[in-house]
Every structure is written in C-alpha cells, then in structure tokens.
Image: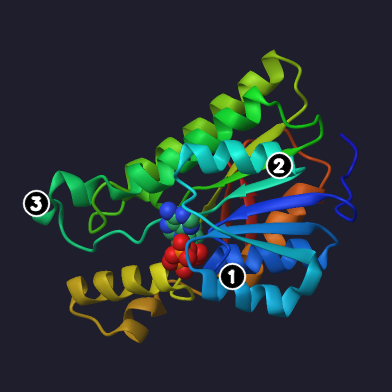
C-alpha cells in the first residue's frame, strides 16, 4: 500500500478538547491536515482553535450521539477519523459499582465507536481513508478499579477488527485499526486511574509509577497516530502503544 499524504485532506478527531485527542489533533494539523475536533467543552476547543488557527474547526457535540456521527461524516467526509473520546471511569472495585456506573464506558466509548464505524462503512468513506479507534492496554490486562472499562475497550478493539474485515470483504479500501495505549498519568483520565491504583496499593504516586518506566506522553500518542495514518500499512488492525512506540498485535 502506498504511503498517504495529509496536506489537503480532512481529519476528524473525537475527544479533541484535552489529553490524547488534543495532542492527536495538533499532530495531524502539524502534518498538514485540516482537523475537525469534536468534544463537549467549547472553551477548550476554542483555545485549541486559537492555537491552530484556521486549520482547526471546533465542533461542540456529544460524540456518542448517533445523529452527530451521521451529520459530521456526511458534512466532512474525513480521510482520517480518530475515535478517541472516552469517559473517565469511576475508580472503585466492582462491587461498589452500580450497573449505571459500571456501564459508563459502554455508553460513551463503545457506543461512539460503534456509531461512527457503522456510518464510515455505510457512507462509505473514500477508499484510502483510515479509521483509528482508541482502545486501551486495559483491554489486554484488565482494570479492576474501573468497572466495565476494560471490557468496553476490548470491544472497541473487536469493532475495529470486524470493520477491517467488512472493508476487505466489500473492497471499500478503508483501513480500520485500534490503538491500545498504556496507562499514563499525563492526562486527566490517566492521572485519576494512577491515583486510584496507587492508593489501593498503599503507595504514593511516584513510588507506584516507579515500576512503569517512562510515561507515555500525549505528544507520543499524536506522533504514533500520524505514523499509522501516513505509513505504508502492515496489514495489522491493532497496536499496543507505550513510550517505546507502537507494537503490532497478533
Ligand atoms: N490516559 C490513559 O492512561 C489512557 C490509556 C489507555 C487508553 N486511554 C483512552 O484514550 C482516550 C483519551 O483519553 P485521555 O487520557 O486523553 O482522557 P481525557 O484527558 O479525560 O480526555 C477525554 C476526552 O474525551 C472527550 N469526551 C468524553 N466524553 C465525550 C463525549 N460524550 N463526546 C465528546 N467527547 C467526549 C473529552 O472531552 P469533553 O469532556 O470536552 O467532551 C476529552 O476531550 C480515551 O478513550 C481513553 O479511554 C487513555
């Protein structure tokens, strides 16, 4: 497969107001794409617009709303779609969850990946388009203080691989992949998770992080997403992501 160029193309990133999504939007913009960033926090999106200028279009919306997915894909037809939005799980052991708190990441993270993936296949996006869903290392390792988070993120990996197979079966030429970042304290969601696991171990946060090695930064996530989008492709549909970089998964 040839390498892909970003200048002159549109990328759409969900959850672009902070954390990984913000860094992904900046990396895609720096590589020449016009970026449409979707999130609910209008103020943070406007701050990013002030930083990136006319190369960034902020859209204040709930990414889990199926109408939002349909409308924005119809309007923007992005060549790059990054499904990154995710709810911060309530950090409690399983028996302290209710079904509503346990299923939060299914209602937000999974529902949004399902809706946008479905729309991308039905439209369909142009051949050569790339859709990346942000899963988590928790999809492999579990996350016992995060309710249904790990299972939700495992399902996101499955949805991306099912969509990759459908794209192939129907000769759509759309690449679907998932990325599984390791836990990092460098975002609001990750910092809350690290604090919860450190407290459970009775450790302070620096001591807890000691065993982790260098933390994955949002900037590294942005670079990794650009690498997948612009790279030649290796036929894989899932990648682990740590501070050491991307590793294709079996
Ligand atoms: N940080 C980690 O350690 C880690 C590790 C593995 C995977 N991940 C995954 O990486 C993704 C990004 O996480 P992060 O660490 O960057 O978290 P974060 O700093 O909390 O950012 C989450 C982003 O998702 C957006 N969002 C949440 N619900 C939304 C909704 N209904 N509609 C639109 N946007 C929504 C938030 O924007 P608004 O609040 O403005 O809507 C925000 O921009 C998530 O899917 C997360 O599960 C994170």
**Which residue shows up at 78% across the image and 40% down it?**
233
Q: Under tag 3, what secondary structure? A: helix
Quarter holding residue 204? bottom left
Front position among marks 2 and 3? 2
User: x%, y% of residue 195?
Assistant: 29, 76
Q: Which residue is mark 2?
A: 75
Residue 151 horizontal/vertical position (percent): 33, 41
First in residue order: circle 3 vs circle 1: 1
- Label 1: few (<14), some or many (≥20) within 10 Å? many
Q: Residue, x 79% and y 58% (percent of image)? A: 34
Could you tell me if residue 183 is visible in this image? no
34 is higher (above) or lower (below) than 68? below
| Pointer 2 with pointer 1, Cβ within 8 A | no
Q: Residue at x 76, y 37 (%)?
A: 129
Q: Is residue 165 left or right of residue 234?
A: left
Viewer-side residue, 204 vs 154: 154
Categorize mark 3 by other alpha carbons within 10 Å: few (<14), some (14-19), many (20+). Answer: few
Q: Are marks 2 and 3 in contact (CB under 8 Å)?
A: no
The extreme top residue here reads: 169
Residue 37, percent across and down? 63, 59
Distance Cα–Cα, label 2 vs label 3: 44 Å
* 3 vs 1, front mark: 1
Q: Is residue 80 visible?
A: yes
In the image, taking residue 234 as reference, residue 181 lies left or right, namely left
Residue matched to label 1: 45
Distance of label 2 from label 1 (alpha carbons)? 19 Å
Give the alpha-carbon distance from disc 3 to disc 1, as whole Å.
Answer: 36 Å
Question: Does mark 3 have its CB less than 8 Å from ligand 1?
Answer: no
Q: In the image, 243: left or right of 158?
A: right
From the image, tell me which residue sits under label 3.
95
């Amino acid at each position: 497969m040839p390498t892909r160029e970003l200048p002159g193309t549109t990328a759409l990133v969900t959850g672009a107001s902070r954390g990984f999504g913000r860094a992904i939007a900046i990396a895609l913009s720096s590589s020449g794409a016009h970026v449409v960033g979707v999130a609910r926090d209008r103020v943070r999106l406007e701050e990013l617009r002030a930083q990136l200028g006319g190369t960034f279009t902020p859209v204040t919306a709930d990414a889990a709303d199926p109408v939002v997915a349909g409308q924005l894909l119809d309007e923007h037809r992005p060549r790059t779609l990054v499904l990154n939005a995710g709810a911060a799980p309530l950090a409690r052991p399983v028996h302290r969850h209710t079904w509503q708190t346990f299923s939060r990441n299914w209602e937000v993270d999974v529902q949004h990946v399902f809706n946008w993936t479905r729309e991308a296949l039905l439209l369909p996006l142009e051949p050569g388009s790339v859709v990346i869903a942000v899963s988590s290392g928790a999809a492999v390792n579990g996350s016992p203080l995060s309710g249904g988070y790990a299972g939700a993120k495992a399902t996101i990996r499955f949805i991306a691989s099912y969509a990759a197979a459908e794209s192939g079966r129907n000769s759509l030429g759309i690449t679907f992949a998932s990325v599984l970042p390791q836990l990092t304290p460098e975002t609001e969601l990750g910092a809350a998770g690290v604090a919860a696991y450190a407290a459970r171990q009775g450790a302070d946060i620096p001591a807890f992080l000691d065993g982790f090695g260098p933390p994955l930064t949002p900037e590294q996530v942005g670079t990794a997403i650009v690498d997948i989008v612009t790279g030649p492709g290796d036929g894989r549909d899932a990648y682990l992501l740590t501070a050491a970089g991307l590793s294709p998964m079996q």
